[in-house]
Image (cartoon, rainbow, N blue to C red):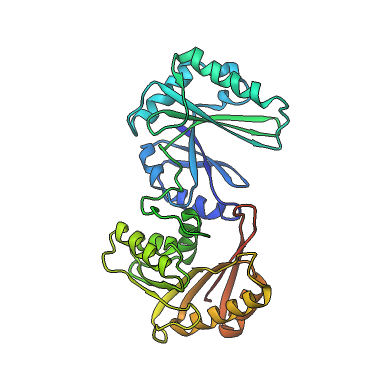
């Protein structure tokens, strides 16, 4: 059985664990903030299909922790054998080092020791990270060192439909978590009136949901249409409009999922009113028994407004970590 370490979003580890538990022959061995350790006995290709993980690394064994001398030719070739089943490799390698509360003073020497050890044991060439080499991962937390290799040729949070950059774009893995939290049945309809580059709508569409949306910026509308085209939605219902005054009919959608604006440059009074207006509009266009799932930086306001408009609904809140900030996911759903 292979051992793995998965990286996910702070505050949403439980969603990623639920996704893991849907796989057979998998056992979660430990959990901590932003990481889940697990063992899996089936094809590692299955793990590359996970949508809520930012990245996954393959660990050879516990013997590879804490002691660089235990990184032997046998260990390294075993890792290469597993990864070579997933993609074409050459005899080069790279290393990504991550430090958290590290006690290591001379990081340059520490890193060079790992590079030298791997090169000495294998005769592989050290190069910058590329698609067809092995990217080893060395994670240093306090005095603990964990060693492994990236499972995919790139991080799992990368998506094929993400070809255009848009300011404030939501990480796809967070969007995937928001979709999972709503627990939709196939064919349900989802609207996002603040679609930006369309990340939420793409993740929803790839889960067999009907999607519609809009944005006040024409460039965002065009990027979202292009992204949905790449996902296989050839005629996406995405329109240019103000997210607080839309053309949608009353009770038109089963749900709404949005990453509301939370730019720190927006004046607080304006942001408060925008949130209130956006939630009121979602209350109008979402069915009475529908779901509203929002990410934003004004959780108290979001909760109070949703309770005011839907007093009989259940409210769930999840504070998450995202680029050094702590926005909150707020979900209103029927009890």
Image height of 78 relative to 27, above or below: above
Q: Position of residue 236 (x, y in %)?
A: 31, 69
Image height of 27 relative to 61, above or below: below
> Residue drawn at (41%, 35%), measured in percent from left and top?
41
Q: Position of residue 195 (x, y in %)?
A: 45, 68
Who is closer to the viewer here, 251 or 15?
251
As drawn, the residue found furthest toward the bottom would be 250
Left or right for 207, reference 32: left
Q: How many marks?
A: 0
Q: Position of residue 164 (x, y in %)?
A: 41, 55
Q: In the rendered view of the protein, which quadrant contains the N terminus?
A: top left
Q: Image quarter for residue 223?
A: bottom left
Q: Position of residue 289 (x, y in %)?
A: 46, 80
Q: Image quarter for residue 270?
A: bottom right
As drawn, the residue found furthest toward the left would be 234
Left or right for 224, reference 242: left
> Residue drawn at (59%, 76%), measured in percent from left and top?
275
Image height of 332 relative to 166, above or below: below
> Residue drawn at (39%, 34%), measured in percent from left and top?
131
> Residue drawn at (64%, 24%), measured in percent from left and top?
108
Image height of 283 relative to 59, above or below: below
């Amino acid at each position: 059985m292979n051992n793995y370490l998965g990286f996910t979003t702070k505050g949403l580890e439980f969603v990623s664990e639920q996704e893991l538990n849907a796989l057979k022959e998998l056992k979660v061995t430990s959990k901590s903030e932003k990481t889940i350790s697990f063992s899996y006995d089936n094809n590692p290709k299955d793990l590359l299909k996970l949508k809520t993980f930012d990245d996954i690394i393959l660990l050879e064994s516990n013997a590879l922790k804490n002691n660089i001398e235990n990184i032997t030719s046998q260990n390294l070739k075993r890792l290469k054998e597993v990864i070579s089943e997933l993609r074409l490799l050459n005899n080069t390698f790279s290393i990504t080092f991550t430090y958290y509360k590290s006690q290591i003073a001379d990081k340059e020497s520490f890193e060079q020791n790992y590079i030298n050890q791997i090169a000495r044991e294998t005769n592989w060439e050290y190069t910058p990270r590329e698609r067809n080499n092995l990217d080893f991962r060395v994670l240093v937390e306090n005095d603990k060192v964990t060693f492994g290799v990236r499972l995919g040729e790139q991080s799992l949070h990368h998506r094929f439909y993400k070809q255009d950059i848009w300011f404030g774009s939501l990480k796809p893995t967070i969007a995937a978590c928001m979709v999972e939290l709503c627990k939709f049945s196939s064919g349900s309809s989802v609207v996002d009136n603040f679609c930006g580059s369309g990340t939420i709508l793409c993740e929803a569409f790839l889960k067999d949901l009907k999607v519609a949306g809009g944005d006040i910026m024409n460039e965002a509308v065009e990027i979202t249409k292009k992204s949905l085209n790449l996902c296989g939605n050839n005629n996406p219902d995405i329109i240019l409009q103000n997210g607080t005054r839309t053309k949608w009919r009353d009770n038109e959608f089963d749900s709404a999922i949005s990453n509301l604006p939370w730019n720190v440059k927006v004046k607080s009074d304006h942001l408060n009113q925008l949130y209130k207006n956006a939630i009121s509009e979602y209350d109008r266009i979402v069915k009475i028994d529908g779901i509203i799932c929002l990410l934003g930086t004004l959780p108290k306001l979001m909760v109070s407004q949703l309770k005011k408009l839907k007093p009989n609904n259940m409210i769930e809140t999840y504070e998450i970590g995202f680029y050094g900030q702590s926005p909150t996911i707020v979900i209103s759903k029927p009890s």
